[in-house]
Image (cartoon, rainbow, N blue to C red):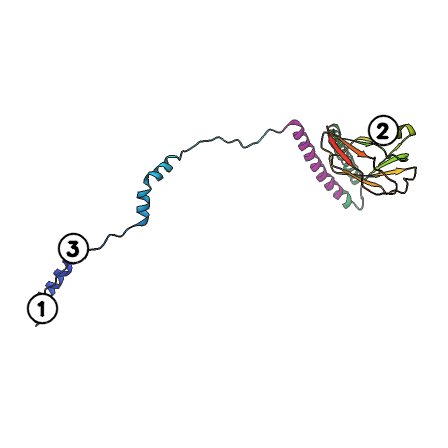
Amino acid sequence: MRRLLGGILLCICFNAAASPQAQDPTVEIEVKKAKIDALENGSLRFLRENRDFLRAQLDRLRQVRRELNGGASALNARDLLLRELMAGIEAGEDSLARERALVAQRELMQSVSELGELESQLDRLEVLLGGQSGRLDQIEADYAGRQRTALLILVQNFPQQDGPERIILEDEDSMRWEVSLSAEQREALRAGGAAQILHEFVEPRRLHFSLRFAGSGYDARPAVAVDVDPARDRINLLSIDLARLDPSSEALLPVSHFQR
């Protein structure tokens, strides 16, 4: 700043001296340095006042090296077998589609050689269909062999008045189970006993049953809907309480679900 002001002053003096024809008297110019108050910076003051706190926070930062596992696991032999079977099924379907397209294009046989080629194609179709059937049998055997979900349905107690003589259970696929109750069995139920009406292996999905009663005035009573969602690979026990069963009432029956 001082150099700049000095240069300006020198330039003004030089111009005044270099003009001899000027009639104006010499003018003295005095340059003074203006005092500028220092600006207060709020951010710097904040950092300066909290310097110890900021240093303590920076000291807490540490670089930590960790080894993470992606969670991948090896496929077992059964998974590899199923994958191989599915790949074979897809390849077989492509081959079947190609062979069927070739057979469909044969509208007219013109020579014995074409008849022989057709016979060869039919033989290949038979082999492919046999392979597909074998793979499906393997998948079915694997599924059936691993099926361990069972459902056991019992009825307990009995109404004090005359109870039904038969209990009929039907599923959504029209499968039907019927249990006939003798006088002794009805007395045993009335005393707190239980009677089994179903014990089957089932699919681990939500199942829908209808429960009906027959005999002793219960034939006209509407069926009772029974739904159960069995747990996979468990023995699921469903108990239906018949203590409040009434031929003139459509009230729901208490149902208990246990697993073992």
Q: Pointer 1: what residue?
A: 19
| Magenta span dominant secondary structure | helix
Residue at screen point 33% across, 48% down: 43
* Foreground tag (1 vs 3): 3
Q: Where residue 71 appears, x then y in whole percent?
A: 56, 32
Q: Pointer 3: what residue?
A: 3
Q: Pointer 2: what residue?
A: 191
Q: Quadrant of residue 196?
A: top right
In-front residue for pair 218/87: 218
| Residues packed near mark 3 inside 10 Å, few (<14), some (14 to 19) or many (20 plus) | few
Q: What distance separates the C-alpha of mark 3 from that of mark 2?
A: 120 Å
Q: What distance separates the C-alpha of mark 1 from that of mark 3?
A: 25 Å
Q: What distance separates the C-alpha of mark 2 from that of mark 1?
A: 139 Å
The image quadrant where one finds the C terminus is: top right
Q: Amino acid at mark 1?
A: Ser
In-front residue for pair 216/18: 216
> Residue 255 vs residue 72: left or right?
right
| Residues packed near mark 2 inside 10 Å, few (<14), some (14 to 19) or many (20 plus) | few
Q: Where residue 255 appears, x then y in whole percent?
A: 78, 36
Q: In terms of secondary structure, where does tag 3 sit?
A: helix
Q: Quadrant of residue 251?
A: top right
> Residue 139 vs residue 36: left or right?
right
Residue at screen point 70% across, 40% down: 94
